[in-house]
Image (spheres, grey):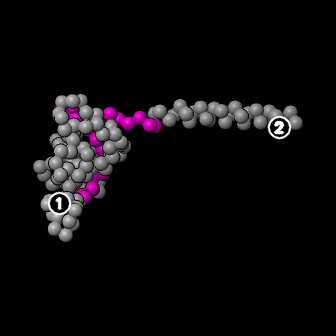
Amino acid sequence: MKGLKMIEAFAKKLSLILALACVAALPAAGQRRALHYEPEKVTLTGRVVYRTFYGPPNYRETPKIDRRETQNILLLDSAVDVVATGNDPTDQTERGVKSITLVLDHSIRHLIGKRVIAEGTLFHAHTGHHHTHVLMSVSSIKRAR
């Protein structure tokens, strides 16, 4: 009987320790990296995909006549928060951002489906051609190792 009580006491202490460890880990797991819009330069990692969206004239209201717009999208390794600083009236704080449109002046077809590191500045969507809430003006992009 004495041995059984010792095992029960040990099990209760172990359960308490594990519960406290889980609670302590929650805030760290729930925190996301906070970024800001241009002019702050940021570095992001993720996988590049090529997505097609409905465009003008009706942006999906009449798919038979709407043009298609294809864009490079960065699917982030980890969600981020993008915080507006008040520098630009179009900027809005966006929480839990997982995908960002990449704005480039050259083709990156060779990177489609690959994990990359992209550097540049962020801006908020402000036209019908912007299909993610946050976009990045890319200054450099390379395959991640």
Q: Residue at x 83, y 37 (%)?
A: 4
Amino acid marked by disc 2: Leu
Q: Residue at x 21, y 66 (%)?
A: 63
Judged from the image, the secondary structure of the residue bearing numbered disc 1 is loop
User: Would you name the residue on which mark 2 appears?
Assistant: 4
Magenta run includes residue 32? yes
**For residue 39, which quarter of the picture?**
top left
Q: Is residue 12 left or right of residue 80?
A: right
Reply above or below: 141 against 3: below
Q: Quadrant of residue 79?
A: top left
Q: Residues within 10 Å of mark 2 (few under 14, many from 20)?
A: few
Residue 16 badge: none
> Magenta residues?
29-51
As measured in the structure, the alpha-carbon distance from the residue carrying label 2 to the one carrying label 1 is 72 Å
Question: Residue 127 appears at what percent x and percent y?
Answer: 16, 48
Q: Residue furthest right?
A: 1
Looking at numbered disc 1 in the image, what kind of residue is underneath it? Asn
